[in-house]
Amino acid sequence: MAPYIFMERNGIHILDLYKTMAKLEEAASAMKQVAKSGKRILFIATKKQAKEIVAEQVKRVNMPYVTERWPGGMLTNFATIRKAVRKMSSIDKMLTQDTYKNLSKREKLQISRERAKLEKQLGSIADLNRLPSAIFVVDILKEKIAIAEARKLNIPTFAMVDTNSDPTLIDFPIPANDDASKSIQLITKIMVDAIEEGLAERKVEKDKKDQEEAEEALEAAKEEKVVDEYADLEDEEAEKILREGEGKGAGKAGEGESSAKKKDGGKRPRKPVSKTKK
């Protein structure tokens, strides 16, 4: 952390805020691009002073988050975690059926306790159907298992890095005090705002693309209509020419008959008169 420390006073290291701002802007820009591409970002903050702050901020953009104990293997063994989430969904479905009403009081209590336990651990990641494209961590020492899993799977990492941490483990480190609630709230808010901007831009681009596709479809329909009308005109012209040709053919046939009559003098041929012998 030496490059990010401004000075030391009474055994306390003071961070260089100019470098913090530069790194924060870089991380926010990268986070915005991830959100703009439609990918999911997992927020991890199990520290007592960060739980409520992170959960409140992240709910604004509907991103998954973990504020309770990190379930080991959540990234590297994601299929097993998904099974637990599906189990929670099956319990929810069972609660609405008549079979649940027929259970004993003890069985109902066991099911409700299991449901509450799963909700506490996995409720915030219930809609995470695939591995996240990036993670944001508040304290990399406390969440070292999550960092190790993300590094193993080559998932980009964003994190608040204090003076007692190693920033080289993080792709986008943000030098900051990860113990102060005000610091956590400020940086988390900036990152969530960046995600919000990325999602808004994605929506605008999608609407623009849909509008362009609709206009292209309308133009294609117009062109098809013009082609059909032109084809109908061609058919009418062809029929007209055909009718005219038939009329001319009939006229020529009539003329042929009249010319033949003229050659014969226009009279009926006389019958030969037989002379009687005397």
Image (tube, helix red, strand yellow):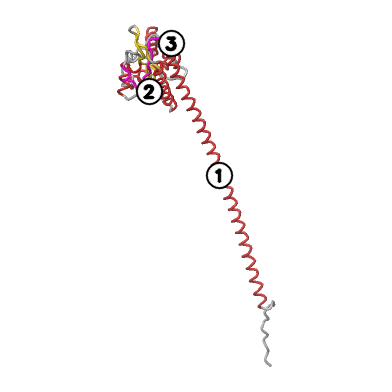
Alpha-carbon span between mark 3 and mark 2: 24 Å
Q: What's the residue type where badge 3 is placed?
A: Lys
Instruction: Find the magenta span and give its range.
Output: 166-184
Q: What's the residue type where badge 1 is placed?
A: Glu
Which image quadrant: the C terminus?
A: bottom right
Task: Based on the picture, tell me whether residue 178 belongs to the magenta stretch.
Answer: yes
User: Percent from the top left, x then y, of residue 180?
Assistant: 40, 9
* Secondary structure beneath label 1: helix
Q: Which mark is residue 134?
A: 2
Determine which residue is flagged by label 3: 182
Closer to the N terminus: mark 3 or mark 1? 3
Q: Left or right: where does residue 17 sit relative to residue 222?
A: left
Closer to the N terminus: mark 3 or mark 2? 2
Q: Which mark is residue 223?
A: 1
* Secondary structure beneath label 2: strand
User: Percent from the top left, x then y, of residue 98?
Assistant: 44, 14
Alpha-carbon span between mark 1 and mark 2: 46 Å
Residue count near mark 1 (Cα–Cα under 10 Å), binned few <14, some 14–19, many ≥20 = few
Taking the spot 63% from the left edge, 65% from the top edge, the residue there is: 250
* Camera sees residue 151: yes
Q: What's the residue type where badge 2 is placed?
A: Ala
